[in-house]
Image (tube, rainbow, N blue to C red):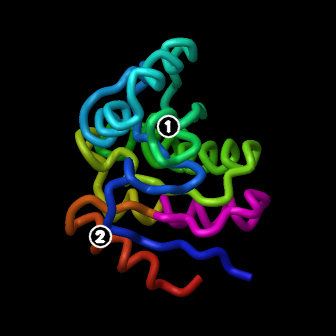
Amino acid sequence: MAVTLEAVRADITRLAVDAIVNAANESLLGGGGVDGAIHRAAGAGLLAHCRTLGGCPTGEARITPGFGLPARHVIHTVGPVWRGGSHGEADLLAACYRNCLRLATENGVKTIAFPAISCGVYGYPVMDATRIAVHETRAALRSGASGIEPVQFVCFGDEVWNAYQKVLSVPV
């Protein structure tokens, strides 16, 4: 049975899922974009908890409680900054999705929502990032990240929405 992967237009901070993914920076202490929005919506408890984690290297992920969010957990991952594509960006972005789904499985997450990791101020080309997100999510779910459904890709803006519509419509 295939897992449902879906693109949604929503405010990720308002989703009542088991886990939302935060496109964080290496400090995990908040920032702009989705990272700042998640920290603001979760409240001071999230920042206090993140201070105990000692940061997170690019490509890796950390999990925290959701605090003031409707989501039970926040999985923080640090995507790569786009530097033209020849500095391992694709491998690092792929690792973000694999590590988030591994943590989700280890923590009993059944529903998860991802933002477009690295597509904001980190400048990753949206279509390339979308292909990686969908490919890595499908691969992780086939190889053991079981019990997670649906996987939502939360789209902010038409470019991201259109990219997910195109990539998700391709038969597997």
Across and down, in percent, residue 160 comes to 28, 64
Quick check: 59 above or below 151? above
Quarter that holds the C terminus: bottom right
Relative vertical location of residue 129 with respect to residue 134 in this rendering, above or below: above
Residue 167 shown left or right of residue 40 in the figure: right
**Residue 60 colored in magenta in the image:** no
Q: Which of 6/57 is in front? A: 6
Compared across the picture, whether 18 is left or right of 143 comes to left
User: Residue 47, how many percent across, how many down?
Assistant: 43, 20
Callout 1: few (<14), some (14-19), or many (20+) C-alpha neighbours within 10 Å?
many
Q: CA distance from mark 2 to mark 1?
A: 21 Å
Judging by the rendered image, the residue that carries numbered circle 1 is: 77
Q: Residue at x 48, y 48 (%)?
A: 70
The amino acid at mark 1 is Thr
Residue 43 lies left or right of residue 51; in this view the side is left
Residue plotted at (38% across, 61% down)? 154
Residue named by callout 2: 161
* Numbered range of the magenta stretch: 133-152
- Residue 97 x/y as whole percent: 56, 50
User: SS class of the residue under badge 1?
Assistant: strand
Q: Secondary structure at mark 2?
A: helix
> In x, y percent, where is residue 72?
58, 44
